Image: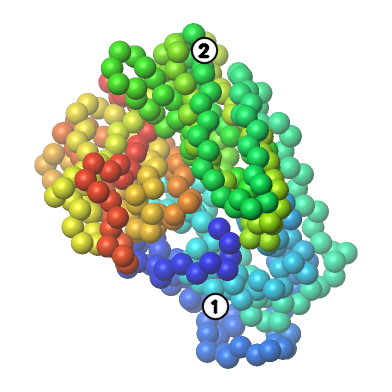
Amino acid sequence: MPWGRRMRPESRGCRACGARARAVAAVLAAAVGLTTPAAAHKPITSPFTFYEDVLPITQARCGACHAPDGVAPMSLLTHEAAVPWAESMRLELVAGHMPPGSDVWPRGRFRHTPPLTARELNVLLTWATGGTPSGDPAKATTPPEPPEGWTLGPPTEVLPMPSVAFESNETARVVETILPLGPRPRALAAVDFRPGTRAIVRSARILVRQHDGGSPRETLLGLWVPGDEAARLPDRAAWPVVPGAELVVRTVYRKRWDREREAASDESAIALYENDGPPGAAAGALEVLATPADTTGQRIIAAARVTRPIRVLALWPDTALAGASVRVDVVQAEGSRSLLAAFDARAGWERRVRLAAPERVRPGARVEVTATWVSPANPAQPGTRLLGLDIVGDE
């Protein structure tokens, strides 16, 4: 998401976001002072320089999007490119919007990129408000080489996607691609997505559509946004796929504003990974849907009942939660409640959040989702899927 886009203030309903906001405010107040008026030409007050101090952070934490050919419309990898965006950088950091999707509570429970540390925030905010000094370009750190091949190693199979072309007057499109999976059954342990043209691919949703007697059913296999890395299901678990199934890839394309009038094209690809030898437990999904009684005002409280012993591997918000502060609790049959996750759901940045260790849930419990919007009132209609959880049986 571009640095310059201003998002809503953090909701008071999310403990993670409140703690992050307080940490950012403390760092900013100590480093630069929030009451200093902006000046046309700021004096150099920052002890941190771009090439010695800022660049190592932006390379590691921002470069997946904010690169010359990345999806964000500005690079943060050279001093010349970053300086015009210093104020936007400050605003986005203070609001806790960057890096997107990094702040999930409780800390340490999930396998994902952590939020910026207090030191990283201090360096970036002090530099952005302290005159944006360049430093010595000769001391710039060498950017990491992009990984060759696929992050999970050689896949079982690679499925090329058809080329998608954009005329100079077309800026955005959602493309659904159907890829047949052939006549044999499969046990998929992971899928990965690789964009062909990084500057125009904003996200991808990868599902398997199966026709096994009843109405076609779809299971989510992957959610991709720039900077994400694929991961295998743990303990040799796998999604069972019947013969004749199809892979459905819904790709969101949007040109950068600085290249809106240019023609563009993309040839992305999907990698499939199957376990060698016998698979472990079959992976499935537990979905939390909104009901008529849930959709009231600016808050939704919805739940899904657990009918058998399960282990929760990951969770993923659906698009209906965009803009909400979300709390996910496990409520036992006797009424005790424990927090599973809390986060802010960002529009366009839906991503799978994987647990570091599976969470066991007993039969009779329910998974409860509380979503609170600041404005406008919640957009979810009855029957809308709010949240999905990747699960395996725990017999």
What is the image's colouring?
Answer: rainbow
Disc 1 crowd rating (10 Å Cα; few below 14, some 14-19, many 20+) is many
Q: Is residue 333 left or right of residue 258?
A: left
As drawn, the label of residue 28 is 1
Q: How many marks?
A: 2
Residue 217, quarter of the rendered image? top left
Identified at 20% across, 61% down, the residue is: 297
Identified at 40% across, 63% down, the residue is: 17
Closer to the N terminus: mark 2 or mark 1? Answer: 1
Residue type beneath disc 1: Leu
| Residue furthest right as drawn | 138
Residue 130, quarter of the rendered image? bottom right
Do labels 2 and 1 touch, CB within 8 Å? no
Residue 356, quarter of the rendered image? top left
Disc 1, SS = helix
Indicate the position of residue 280 as horizontal and vertical percent values: 42, 17
**Which is more toward the observer, 72 or 164?**
164
Q: Is residue 178 left or right of residue 153?
A: left
Indicate the position of residue 229 as horizontal and vertical percent values: 58, 39
| Residue furthest top as drawn | 184
Residue type beneath disc 2: Gly
Identified at 77% across, 52% down, the residue is: 143
As drawn, the label of residue 182 is 2
Quadrant containing the N terminus is bottom right
| Residue furthest left as drawn | 334
